[in-house]
Amino acid sequence: MLPHVHQVTKYDPADRDEHGHYVGAREVTSDRGEYEAAYLQAVATFAADAGVDRLSVREPGVPSFVHFGSGEAEDDYGLGTLFPHGLHDFHDGAEVRLATALELVRIMLRDSGAWCRLEADGIFEVHVGWDQYLYICTSRPSTDAVARTRALGLLPERLIASPYAVETEPSDIQRPADDEFWSALSWAVGSGRAGMLEETYIEGATRYHRLSRDTLDVVRTRLTPRARLAVWPALSPDVGAVLGSLPRDGLVEGVWQDTDGRLHSAVADEEDYAELTTRMEGAAAAALLSIDADERVPLFTAVLPDTDGVVRARWQTEPTPEDRKWAFLRTLQPGQVVTGTVTETAPFGVTFVDVDGYEGFINIPELSWRSVTHPADVVSVGQRIHAEVLGVDGVRGQMALSLRAVQDDPMQQLTGQVGTTLSGHVTKLVPFGVFVRIEEIENGFAGLVHNSELLGRQEKEPQGGIEVGSTLRVKILDVDLGSRRITLSQRQADPEV
């Protein structure tokens, strides 16, 4: 917040009541003449004192399109001559020359609809309030500018802060529309979850984009800098069913795709439902979105960062459940231990775990150091477990966990038994040898006796007479924890035979 703030008005402080409200006779609207010119000259004077000749547009806004219409502004709010390409050039972070900034101040003084803050970061700010109140904030005293402003017939007063100063609390849930976001969006589109992108490019101005794997890159290049984005499911081709879900009353937003592939939107209440229905009936696909903030919940949201990857837009999206999941997952690191509750043991070998309200999964090899046939052999639904984070997939919003990583590896105990001779049962025959279980439990570790280490067999029939269940006396030659291999020998177990 800049330390030197001046409220600049045409109103005499003597004409205020005990509450500070102006009660004088001077008009509170722009006279579009002498005083308007004085306001602009005052801004130019303070800017010159600050050494500023360019300003950035911050938090631009126009009246919201909460009425029945096309969803596009028919009025340029006086910006047409300043931004030839329309409202999309009037975006957060757009840098303008001082002359253009002064014209923006004029538009705001006239209450033409468009509004923004004008800033030179850390040096200078201009805010236009209601009823011809102007606030100029500087990083250093502007004694000469104050004197010249008084000479223009205006009344500058020192304030502690501008009432339009930015007061935002940074959120850990705000997602940037970075490469990971676009990869996640591509996956959501490819999997059929998503099909439409809502772009709020100015406060109060929105447009929609149809999404497919083929159009994602094109849509990305067309977005207005620092826009807010919301991802929605695809429009429904069953337009009749969509129209049949119109509520009895209240505001709704209809979004539809015409036969030429273009998207349209309109906000309507019960008085406009008939016209909305007429406009949507011939559409190729459509959807109805609630205007109620509590019910208007997209799949996930983001804000466009600048080209260097930094999010400088101060506005934020309302976090969705998926956004909260993204924020939680980004706090996790491989090797971190989390606590969760088993919610499902799937027959295909995956266990699902609820961790602080978010789903993680454990593949069957990560359930135990020992062989597992079904997850239910190790865990049960409702069981509280500790598991180690193996990795986080930000694209699919998944966390991979390991239960065995937080347990001692029982194979380590076998490393101290290298050289030991013992008896075990044959569990499997393979062309190159036999596997023998060397622990007296059902899922005990088994090691390989290579054909060359079998005792007294013919070369062409090294396994002759050996069957699953046969008992062999073997010697442990090696236990390799990395490859999970145990090497055995029958020949060396009875070297004298």
Image (cartoon, grey):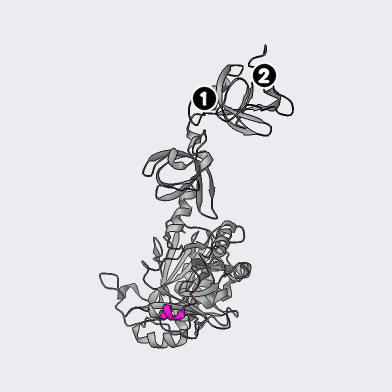
Question: x, y percentage for residue 288?
Answer: 42, 76
Residue depicted at 26% across the width and 69% down the height: 19
Residue named by callout 2: 491
User: Is 428 displayed left or right of 43 in the figure?
Assistant: right
In the drawing, what numbered circle is on residue 439? 1
Residue 309 percent across, percent down from the top left: 59, 57
Of the 4 image quadrants, the one containing the C terminus is top right
**189 vs 289, nearest the viewer:** 189
Query: In the figure, is residue 66 to the left or right of 405?
Result: left
Q: Which residue is at the far left?
A: 18
Query: Which residue occupies the foreground of this view, 96 or 18?
Result: 96
**Which of the numbered marks, if any, corresponds to residue 298?**
none
Q: Amino acid at mark 2?
A: Arg
Residue farthest to the front?
A: 465
Asked if the magenta segment contains residue 493, the reply would be no
Badge 1 crowding class, 10 Å Cα cut-off, few under 14, some 14 to 19, many 20 or more, is: some
Q: Is residue 91 above or below residue 409?
A: below
Q: Amino acid at mark 1?
A: Glu
Q: Is residue 172 among what the camera can see?
A: no
> Going by the picture, which residue comes out furthest to the right?
459
Residue 71 image offset from top left, x and y in percent = 48, 80
Magenta segment, which residues? 233-243
Q: Is residue 389 above or below residue 58?
A: above
Residue 11, located in which quarter of the rendered image?
Answer: bottom left
- Asked if residue 136 shows in the view, the reply is yes
Instruction: Residue at 48% x, 30% y: name it.
Output: 442
Q: Give the quarter of the image for residue 310.
A: bottom right
Tell how many labels: 2
